[in-house]
Image (spheres, helix red, strand yellow):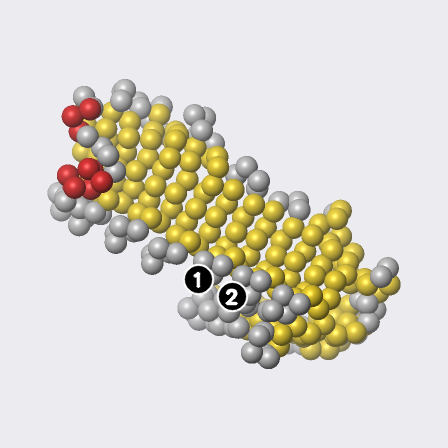
């Protein structure tokens, strides 16, 4: 198994003078280090099954350079990244789910970060000091925020079919439309007719109950505001589990993990 895996990643033991071996407790091979020089080597990790787990180029004993790859035990890539000779990540850093679909990508050159849905469509995009956007499951925009200056964002809300529902400007958390504080509702829809985003604003500030969904149609948050003060906020994880509840009436904050286990419950 080890020989086959080494052959698959084009490692020929005969090309190296020294090969270090690190073993699991059960004496199976855990890591092989193929030395080019005393402190420069290629490090290959293995699962106890003998399947390849990782490969990285190391210099000066600890510094990564060139390409590094991690694999799931089923042989599909888990994480791919690249480093320059100084150990700094360059180009694209990509992580995958176990089924092979891309999960996250970061471009070190453009500073652009993208999360992906299971179908490979973009879920969330962030470009440092430029913009961020949330997407429906089909990849179309849900919300897009483009930074103008600090604390000012041009915002756009969309239906799942790409129709633009609203555009305006957030200034220090107050929403403006045509240079005036916005009064009215913002309502967006999934293609099946279900509301994906709802809020009512008075003088640019949310009023009453509002809610929004993730692009996969799971609830994202529920919120209630009275007299310009938030009195209730309930956030959800993407899988539908409750993330936290902030209750200003009861003066409590309660948080759970993604599996539903209570983590924290405190008085505000």
Q: Name the element at disc 2.
A: loop
Task: Count all numbered tags in the image, as a single digit.
Answer: 2
Closest to the observer, 243 or 128:
128
- The foreground one among 64 and 127 is 127
Crowd tier of the residue under label 1, counting other residues whose Cα lies within 10 Å: few below 14, some 14–19, many 20 or above: few
Q: Is residue 64 left or right of residue 166?
A: left
Q: In the figure, is residue 22 to the left or right of 102?
A: left
Is the Cβ of the residue at disc 2 closer than 8 Å to that at disc 1? yes
In the current view of this chain or complex, which residue is farthest to the right? 180
Residue 21: x and y, percent?
Answer: 18, 33
| Viewer-proximal residue among 263 and 229 | 229
Picture layout, residue 243 above or below residue 52: below
| Residue at the spot of label 2 | 137
The residue to which callout 1 is attached is 119
Q: Position of residue 223 (x, y in %)?
A: 65, 73
Q: Residue at x 39, y 52 (%)?
A: 96
Quadrant of the image occupied by residue 170? bottom right
Q: Secondary structure at mark 1?
A: loop
For label 2, the crowd category at 10 Å Cα-Cα, with few meaning under 14, some 14 to 19 and many 20 or more, is many
Q: Quadrant of the N terminus?
A: top left
Mark 2 or mark 1: name the one nearer the start of the chain: 1
Residue 191 placement: quadrant: bottom right
Residue at the image position 50 percent from the left and 55 percent from the top? 115
Query: Where residue 161 sits: x, y (%)?
Result: 60, 69
Picture residue at 48% right of the left edge, 35% below the top: 90
Q: Is residue 62 left or right of residue 188?
A: left
Q: Tell me the quarter of the image containing the C terminus.
A: bottom right
Q: CA distance from mark 2 to mark 1?
A: 8 Å
Residue 9 visible to the viewer: yes
Residue pictured at 69% horizontal, 74% vertical: 187
Residue 254 visible, this orientation? no
């Amino acid at each position: 198994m080890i020989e086959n895996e080494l052959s698959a990643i084009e490692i020929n033991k005969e090309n190296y003078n020294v090969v270090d071996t690190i073993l699991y407790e059960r004496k199976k091979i855990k890591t092989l280090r193929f030395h080019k020089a005393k402190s420069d080597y290629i490090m290959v990790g293995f699962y106890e099954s003998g399947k390849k787990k990782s490969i990285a180029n190391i210099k000066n004993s600890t510094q990564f350079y060139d390409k590094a790859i991690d694999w799931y035990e089923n042989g599909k890539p888990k994480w791919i990244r690249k480093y320059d000779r100084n150990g700094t990540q360059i180009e694209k850093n990509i992580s995958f789910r176990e089924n092979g679909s891309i999960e996250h990508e970061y471009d070190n050159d453009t500073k652009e970060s993208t999360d992906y849905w299971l179908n490979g469509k973009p879920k969330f995009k962030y470009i440092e000091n430029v913009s961020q956007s949330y997407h429906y499951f089909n990849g179309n925009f849900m919300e897009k925020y483009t930074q103008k200056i600090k604390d000012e964002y041009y915002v756009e809300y969309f239906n799942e079919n790409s129709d633009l529902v609203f555009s305006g400007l957030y200034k220090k958390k107050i929403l403006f439309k045509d240079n005036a504080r916005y009064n009215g509702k913002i309502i967006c829809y999934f293609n099946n007719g279900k509301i994906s985003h709802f809020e009512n604003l008075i003088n640019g500030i949310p009023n009453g109950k509002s809610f929004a969904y993730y692009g996969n149609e799971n609830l994202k948050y529920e919120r209630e505001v009275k007299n310009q003060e938030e009195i209730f906020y309930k956030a959800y994880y993407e899988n539908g589990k409750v993330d936290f509840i902030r209750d200003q009436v009861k003066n409590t904050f309660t948080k759970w993990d993604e599996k539903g286990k209570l983590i924290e419950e405190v008085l505000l």
